[in-house]
Amino acid sequence: MKIDRRSFLSFLIGGAAGTTLSPLTWKLMDDSAIWTQMWPWTPVPEDGEASYVNSACSLCSGGCGITVRKIDDRAVKIEGMKGHPLNNGGLCILGLSGLQLLYGPTRVWTPLKRVGKRGRGRWEKISWKGAVSEVAETLGDLRKKGQSHTAGIISGSDRGTVPRLFDRFLTVYGSPNLMRTSSIIDSYELTLHLMQGVQALPGFDFENADFILSFGSGIVDGWGSPVRMFRANSTWCNTGGKVVQIEPRLSNTAAKSDKWIPINPGTETALALGIAHVIIKESLYDAEFINYYSEGFEDWKRFVLDEYGPDSVATITGIDSATIIALASSFARASKPLAICGRGQGTTPGSLNECTAVHALNALVGNINKKGGIFAVAEPDYINWPEVEMDARAAVGMQKDRLDGAGSKKYPFSRHLLNRLPQAINSGEKYPLKALFVAGANPLYTMSDSKAVKKAFDKVPFVVSFSSYMDETAQNADLILPNHAYLERYEDIPTPAGMPKPVIGLSRPVVKPLFNTKHTGDVIILLAKAMGGNIADAFAWNSYDECLKETLGYKWRVMVEKGFWSHPDFFVQTHEESFDTVSGKFEFAPKETGSLKQFKPVKIEGDKTNYPLLLIPYDSIRLANGVVGDPPFVMKSVDDTVLKGTDVFIELNPKTAGEHGLREGQLAMLSTPVGKARVKVHLFDGIMPGLVALPRGLGHTAFDDYLAGKGINFNELIGPVEDSVSGLDAAWGIRVKLAKA
Amino acid sequence: MSALDNNAKEIAEDAGGEELATSSPEINQKEQDNRSAGPVILFFIIGLFASLILGWIIFPKLLYSKKKQPIDFNHVLHVAEVEDGCESCHFFREDGTYSGVPKLEQCIDCHEEIQGDSPDEIKFVEEYVSKGREVPWLIYSRQPDCVFFSHAAHVKGAGMDCVTCHGHIGESESLKIYEENRITGYSRDIWGKSIGGFKKNTWDRMKMDDCAECHREKTANIERTDVKTPTNRLIDHLIDMVYPGTSKSGKGGSIQTERDACFVCHK
């Protein structure tokens, strides 16, 4: 039998017929359809039991309560906690995106030790035991040599149990150098201290105020506790409350306000004094408060009346005198007016002068410690640990001056002056810093004049980061002792600044720690025990959780049940009790600071000839610029007139752009006395001519691919300017020149 | 000239060539027919059977890989111990969602200590319970991720029995081998044991047609159109376009929503 072509064809036909009659084709078609839906990169939601855990968000200092939805063991959604005194169910875009930080690729999985040169990104994994003993050894050596004061800590906060444990550790170890990240709160604390004689945080009763005079505060751009501010802003829309926004740029807050008054940048103090002038002149002030509860009013009044008439203020501020008069009149005539300051998100302290001038406006209308006004909120005193017993070495160390100069003869009132640290290290005028711990802060990104900060860090031989994420500071550390992420740990979240009533939030583990991380509180306790002696004795707790429970006492139960604790019988102090100054009254011109009353413009860096324009930063709720950067969800919300690809846009008035021959979208080179950057131009009528605005929160070198390498870090272009009274960073901008790139 | 024409010409030439070579064209023609008919039929049959064997017998063996469950579970033993039948372990949560395969949490009450001496029991307690690891059960009835199925609607709402879809698994003393489709990763139980898709019982298959079958029956009584397969839907749609208004598809196909939309069942 010959097998020819016909046989072959008939075999094929038979095969085709058979295949048709078999399920092969149909089954394969069906399976391949399902296969296309099963590609491993297709995200599939978890299936399982839904549950909710109440916790607190600590991605910024806002202290919002959160409710996290879980499916089995996986956190799937963060929502605002209903009934929470701060955010009552609301949450900001960063808080909503927190899961991307928890599960994202930027977490530090295990303790790491640097290999090779610092900042090269080469690490070796080490055990917790090894890591703690290495730190203990280094600190022990310093102490033996009588150099305990050369150890320092940069902390995101000085309130709450973890920062206080650090403080306690440093005290008993023998170093005065715990430095807190600075913000407008520093200026407010100082203002309250000088004018009211109290050590307290400012608390603003926004919910009951009906006229907000904001000196550049980004009410809907992330100032204060952001969600509380959004809610207050909505309340004013419904109740007819008015917002007047004073700033040189049409920010989101300005756009949403009832009136936006553009002002020459840095002249806000003059405007505040000008408004005071009109109020005094027209006798619109609260005479009862002034007469019975204030001191130094007559001197201050004379000075304000002499120097700050509407016409002279108009010249300084660029706001016409009629507007100033009308503004002063509407502020003073409102039933519950409230003046606030702190530019943008309030991340820089600004000049103390400005803060006291704005606070004086509140005093003029008598809304201190009054409904709808500003309160001095004392810290809830729940942390009552036994006094530490310092040995001789610790006592000697604690006697040394702080490296940042806070509390020194020059700056006797300031408690923290982190902005002065890089200069102190780089100049070497006092003593070198030999060990630096960084917790809850990312100074290599957030501090101005990045180059100088980096240089200072390079001079510190031993840098330890406690970050949960591989941020800029962790990248440049010698040792990373990763903390549990904020959704994996217990921690108390003390009253956020701006809240008129004490509230303590409880951050609690939503999920079990995903990696080989350790609570920073536990690390401090372990470290103390490893060091032995008085240091170990000061930390009697076996674990941080035990310490926290013991510290909170009866509040713990309430906090576990409700998710937060608020003062049940908090009452408004009477004016008789409010002021702890020498006179027992509100001080309009505190004697401690002779120069306070004068408006002295902050001398910002750069000369006018070489740098004809002014560069100012701006903040947006869509750009996190604190201890964490934008997670991908938030990055997605950034407008393409802010960031396109990796290029950041500067905002420029069309008139200024015309003078420089720049068009929309064109590349330009921005140079300040501190740094240079290539940017794109966005023409914006909402910015005053002669100004250049650049967003904060971009230009990260750390975090994930969605954020790193995009745009410019504003801090690379600006340096700190010391306030003459407080020593805090008073810079609001820097001079800049712009050229076609 | 096209390839087909070329081919035809070639065949013609071949035939012609043979004719020239033989002396008697008639005999030759017959011989040729006899010579070619046998192999042609034979090869057709070979091809037919080979492909039938391939499609019906070899293909399923290639398509599915056989996996053993991590623990051999005895349903009979457990059903006898519990009060509420299937729902004792496969229960509805408070929010109405269905718990599915039990988690360790439910087992741990009785199995904290080893019960009896079966090797599976020892393995279960030692490897899973004491280590706190969930058992990676292979789920026979797991549907593709895109399928939205509510147990509550069917069991609570329509009062259906577990057996209708899941068969008599509650009466099994041992877990059968899990056959995993190598292409899709799902159990063979979805398509059904029969590769041809034939079934005797309602629980033999769990494909969309099987959903549709039941929905069609239930909805027929209340004069609604049925849940449509994509092909039916396409035909209906075409009829609708050509002869508007004559198509049967008027009302919704879903009992739940009375709408005729894919997203009722497909996420």
Image (cartoon, coloured by chain):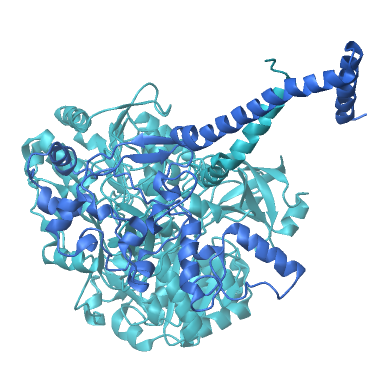
Chain colours: A cyan, B blue
Q: Identify the residue at horizontal 24%, vertical 45% (top origin).
A: B134
The answer to whether residue A465 is visible is yes
Q: Is residue A323 left or right of residue B26?
A: left
Q: Quadrant of residue A353?
A: bottom left
Q: Nearer the viewer, residue B106 or B226?
A: B226
Query: Which of these two is toward me, A698 or A42?
Result: A42
In the rendered image, residue A694, in percent from the top left (x then y), is placed at 58, 52
Side of B11 where A464 appears, left or right: left
Q: Is residue A272 above or below residue A182?
A: below
Relative to B39, say whether A167 is above or below.
Answer: below
> What residue is rendered at 22% in x and 31% in y?
A135
| Place of residue B223 in the rendered image (x, y in percent of width and height, measured from the top left) | 53, 78
Give left or right: position of A147 versus A43: left
Q: Residue A332, position in %: x, y?
A: 47, 84
Which residue is nearer to you in this view: B233 or A718?
Answer: B233
Name which residue lies at 28% across and 42% down. Answer: A153
Q: Is any part of residue B267 visible from this angle?
A: no
Name the spot of residue A630 as percent of width and height, x first.
47, 50
